[in-house]
């Protein structure tokens, strides 16, 4: 069974600090990796997607992928209170549109 | 990103009744849509893959006769919860990929409460 694992948290970081969120996956054939942000009572919102090993940066967000170690991470620089949410890691076995397997999510709390 | 809408955003129904939830892609066509269910403090669980013009593919453990899916056009998929019971109360969310890219965009979700 394909699994995606995340620490449920909560991960508490002070405002302005770097938040580091981690995710491991079991299917070595996975090709597409995503980070979604979900506020309480809302649906997930796509934050980052990454397909190849290395780093991908978009504003304050950096996704990191290491296929050999089967982990993907999300760094949030200059964390803001509005970043407080649950971050879901999702993995797809293909490089095209297909179903996603989600982790249970990490709850991030950014404190003032 | 692509925009996906859902209707209704919330619904309360009596046990034994059926509820239909619509999922629409507003600015793109989607041959495939996905239906998820999320219980409180849990992650998203894929229920089924909706395919335009053909039968839906259901995940293991999801009753196809209870959760009817119809994908009659390239912009609309519907999920009907038949003979709803209190244990069906949940947050139902659809998603769709835009084009052939793997990114999926989620609708705002429908909160179903069965009394």
Image (cartoon, coloured by chain):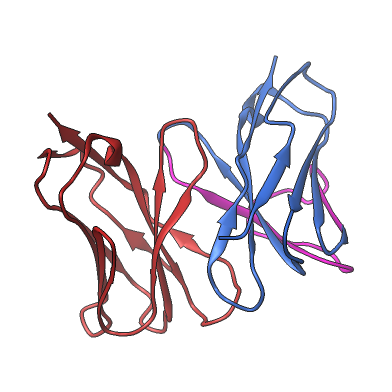
Chain colours: A red, B blue
Question: How many circles with numbers are drawn on the protein?
Answer: 0
Q: Position of residue B103 (x, y in %)?
A: 53, 68
Q: Quadrant location of the N terminus of chain A?
A: bottom left
Residue for point 40% across, 65% down = A34
Q: Quadrant of residue B57?
A: bottom right
Q: Quadrant location of the C terminus of chain A?
A: top left
Q: Position of residue B4 (x, y in %)?
A: 67, 51
Residue for point 50% across, 36% down = A42
Which one is nearer the viewer's eye here, B14 or A39? Answer: A39
Q: Position of residue B77 (x, y in %)?
A: 80, 53
Which one is nearer the viewer's eye here, A44 or B112? Answer: A44
Which one is nearer the viewer's eye here, B60 or A79? Answer: A79
Placement of A55 over or under B44, stated as above or below: below
Placement of B60 over or under A43, stated as above or below: below
Q: Quadrant of residue A74?
A: bottom left
**Does the segment drawn in magenta span residue B58?**
yes
Which portion, as a residue range, is magenta? Answer: B42-71
Q: Residue furthest front?
A: A59
**Does the segment drawn in magenta span residue A51?**
no
Left or right, A40 with reference to B31: left
Q: Quadrant of residue A102?
A: bottom left
Q: Position of residue B35 (x, y in %)?
A: 66, 52
Placement of A70 over or under A88, stated as above or below: below
Left or right, B14 with reference to A76: right
Residue for point 9% across, 47% down = A17
Left or right, B76 with reference to A107: right
Which one is nearer the viewer's eye here, B71 or A81? Answer: A81
Residue for point 37% across, 49% down = A104
């Amino acid at each position: 069974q394909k699994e995606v694992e995340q620490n449920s948290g909560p991960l508490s970081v002070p405002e302005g600090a770097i938040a580091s969120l981690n995710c491991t996956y079991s299917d070595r054939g996975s090709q597409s990796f995503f980070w979604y942000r979900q506020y309480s009572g809302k649906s997930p919102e796509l934050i980052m997607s990454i397909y190849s090993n290395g780093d991908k940066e978009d504003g304050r967000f950096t996704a990191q992928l290491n296929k050999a170690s089967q982990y993907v991470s999300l760094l949030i620089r200059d964390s803001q209170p509005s970043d407080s949410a649950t971050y879901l890691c999702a993995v797809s076995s293909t490089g095209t549109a297909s179903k996603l397997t989600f982790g249970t999510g990490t709850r991030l709390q950014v404190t003032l | 990103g692509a925009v996906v809408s859902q209707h209704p955003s919330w619904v309360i129904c009596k046990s034994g009744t059926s509820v239909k939830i619509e999922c629409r892609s507003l600015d793109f066509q989607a041959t495939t849509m996905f239906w998820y269910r999320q219980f409180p403090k849990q992650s998203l669980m894929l229920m089924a893959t909706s395919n335009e013009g053909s039968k839906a593919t259901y995940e293991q453990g999801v009753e196809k006769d209870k959760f009817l899916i119809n994908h009659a056009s390239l912009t609309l998929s519907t999920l009907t919860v038949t003979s709803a019971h209190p244990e069906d109360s949940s947050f139902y969310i659809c998603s769709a990929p835009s084009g052939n890219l793997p990114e999926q965009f989620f609708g705002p979700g429908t909160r179903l409460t069965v009394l």
